[in-house]
Amino acid sequence: MSLVQFESFTSSVDPDYWYELENKKLTEFKLDNTERDIYATYNTGGEHEQVSSRIRLSRGAFNKQDTFNTMSVYDFSSPGTLLNSNTMEDFKNLDKKAIIKEVAKKIYDSIVSGDWINDPTLLTRFYLISYAELKQHVFYHWFAFPAITPTQALTSPTSSHLIGKTFNEEQVEQLRVAYDMYRTDNHIRDRSFFVVVHNQTSNTLTINSFSSYKEEQSSDSKVYFAFADPSSLESHPGWPLRNFSLAVSHRFPTHSVYTFLCIREIPNKRDLSRSLFIDINQATLSDPSKMVAVGWEKTLNKSRPKIADMGQMMDPIKLAESSVRLNLELMKWRMFPSLDLNKLSNTKCLLVGAGTLGCHVARNLMAWGCFNITFIDRTKVSFSNPVRQPLYEYVDCLNGGANKAQCAADHVKKIYPNANANAYSLDIPMPGHPYDDSHKEAVQSHYEQMNELIKSHDVIYLLTDTRESRWLPTLLATANDKIVINAALGFDSYLVMRHGQPNHTNRLGCYFCFDVVAPVDSTKDRTLDQQCTVTRPGVSAVAGSLAVELLVAMLHHKLESNAPASIVGSQDQGELGFIPHQIRGSMSNFQNALMTGSAYNQCTACSDAIVKEYKKNGFDFLHKVFNRSKLLEELTGLDQLQQKTQGMLDEMEFIDEDDEEYQFM
Amino acid sequence: MISLDHFEKSCRDFVSNQDVQLQGWKFCVVDGGGVYLNVVKRCDTRVEVNVKECEELEFEEHDPSAVAVSNTSVIEFDFHIAYHKIFKVPFLLLRATVDGIQLGQQDIIQHLSEGKDDWLPKELNHYTFLTQGEHPVLGTIYFYLHPCQTAELITTVTDRDFERIDYVAVWLSFFGRAVGLHVPMSSISNKKI
């Protein structure tokens, strides 16, 4: 006499069930945490020992009919109850022992009352407790498959054996055909437990549902109590047999031993050969008050809940992330194998100016997967902005207008929630824009913030609408050896360029290298129409795109920002082709010209004399420059140059009427 | 490119083949939602069951009548073929789960390319096109192979009228290989190509 050991169910919850639960929780259940009917399915075992005794919940679990509709003839259903807690605390505090006892009691009652005869699936009733962490899309869940423990543990007088030991091949085939017919002719609920009667005289096998089976006393008939067995283990029957054997013992109490047929049919294979016979001794139910039940699902040999983390699949932000990534990866796989997406995504860009150029640059950076973007701007969004500046909307202009830098950062995050977008509302101190001493402290603090921001970023984009506002960031970027990309607009022309850095070989010029005057207040003589840059609208979009493409091209050269300037016909190219120094374009003839210019040793922004003076005297030096920009010309010796030139011009008696600079120069 | 109607007909033709049925292919119709083909394949290779700890809730339940549960399981691949309305071609969707717990993209790629099962492909390259998106019929998220070059590729097989070929079978003979789905020869009738 040996103890019979059963293989427990292992739950396997289809991802779609969680979608369904989340949906129902949000739209239907809400805070209502009453019990719900659910339906699970299982297959017969025999094929894969590794996925033996799996019980599944799928998308139709909440609807009996949906579940039945999707079941094939190889699927068996099991009725269950869901208790979805509203909080983790509730979930933890559920009385697991009381729950399993209560569910087992229902099974017990159906055995005693005989209800199971009409619906044998009641013997496999299960219970599921869960807690849905909807923000993270994490689902804590725990199944109970109650098995009632009889007064004495279930034992067998013999050991189990394969069907082929009792039935010959012909009989196995006869059984298979009979079972096929039986399934088609009977209700789904009668499919999983039934009676096989073998008439030994006529050698015929007949299958009866429990509701139609009448116990015969005929001595030439052998009765087998059969069930769809989810187990694939060679010597252990599956979990449903535990309650089933008790139900059979209780229903047909005159036997001392019952022979059970564990049907294991490999779906689609017409193969019953893995089925088992097992004899089990008569067992008795204990008193209802003393009833004991076991069956909380074990995972890694311990009774504990399972956790399904669906965040990757259900979190729309993660989906956006993977889709954006895919788009860039496609470019990498198809066109540009050396595309360094990590480099782009790690590059921190500081956008000085959040106007038309700032918006276009930010948009294009995002398209390249570069999401570390910080905006500096001191203005507010005005009514004329949204139509030209693609990060703003009409509502941003209301009530005096939103803070522009912050508004830009907010919109970047709306476009892509994972973007690391930040904003600083800063006044950029400018040469030739004097201020009272009372403002000195404020100016100094703005300078210091600006300096910190430049230090903490990799690339500085100069996108403001005046020449002099570019001076301080140019100087600070030079002093901190940072990449600078500069874009400036005229009415129908644009300049996009990169600045050389101090340690570069054949250092390229900065924006100010091509001037022989220090920056002065250029807005003084402007008209009152908000002192806006008046340009053909497409100019900023083109220049904004070029400013980003120039950076990306540069980052894909082995020397990065030290890459020599490409000119037409040169071999100096990166992975993406040309890396020009300056792109000067004109919308009036739709042409670009690539230009190269070396750093000028008398430059008012990047020359050694200025950088040295700044490094030596810091803000004191800047303070003087802001109040008197001529100082820059004196320091660099530009004043002498100007005098010399003036002298030469006077000698030539040449009078230049029109010394107006190009708007973008 | 094929029409939705032709796709549906082609799917029905495909699953009417007995060898295809033996592989486990099912034709699924969702009320008011469309149609798709589905097959589930299991790997024989064992994988450790990945369990997140939830220690405070553990308890011991003494039950001598139960067999110890195995700590390993297998990966189950759930393949779908649905119709892509923009590219107007079939496309392949998939999920991989271990007892219901979904595998991420990297794990899927790894198992498809390095798995020991006979049916798995050994070479990888198409997989890098694996991305996540909504199942056009079920509305939930699956991984799928990007369908952008499908129409072009099919044209290399036949320049004849697509209505006359076993489109789904021919298509699958190309795209199924990438994930180890092999098309029974009997499902493609030579004379039609």
Image: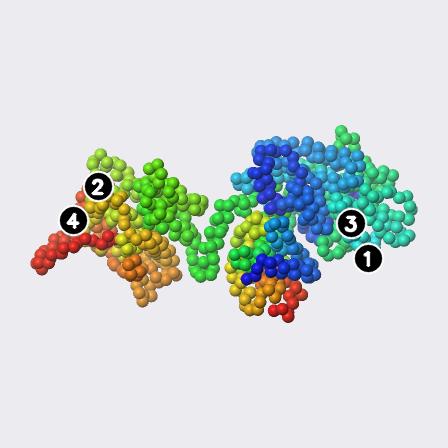
Q: Nearer the viewer, mark 1 or mark 4?
A: 1
The residue pinned by badge 2 equals A623
Q: Residue at x 26, y 36 (%)?
A: A442
Determine crowd level at label 3: few under 14, some 14-19, many 20+ residues with C-alpha closer than 10 A.
few
Judge from the rendering whether residue A28 lies leftward or rightward of residue A643; answer left or right: right
- Residue A169 is marked as 1
**The numbered mark 3 sits on a residue in which chain?**
A
Determine crowd level at label 1: few under 14, some 14-19, many 20+ residues with C-alpha closer than 10 A.
some
Query: Which of marks 2 and 4 precedes in the sequence?
Result: 2
Cα gap from disc 3 to disc 1, whole angstroms: 24 Å
The residue pinned by badge 3 equals A185
Instruction: Determine the image quadrant of residue A23.
Output: top right
Judge from the rendering whether residue A163 lies leftward or rightward of residue A563; answer left or right: right
Query: Which of marks 3 and 2 precedes in the sequence?
Result: 3
Cα gap from disc 4 to disc 3, whole angstroms: 104 Å
Q: Is residue A644 above or below residue A68?
A: below
Q: Residue at x 91, y 49 (%)?
A: A220
Q: Tell me which amino acid carries mark 3.
A: Asp
Q: Tell me which amino acid carries mark 2.
A: His
Q: Tell me which amino acid carries mark 1.
A: Glu
* Residue at the extreme bottom of the image, as rendered: B191
The residue pinned by badge 4 equals A634
Along the line of sight, which residue is nearer the eye, A383 or A284?
Answer: A383
Query: Which of marks 3 and 4 precedes in the sequence?
Result: 3
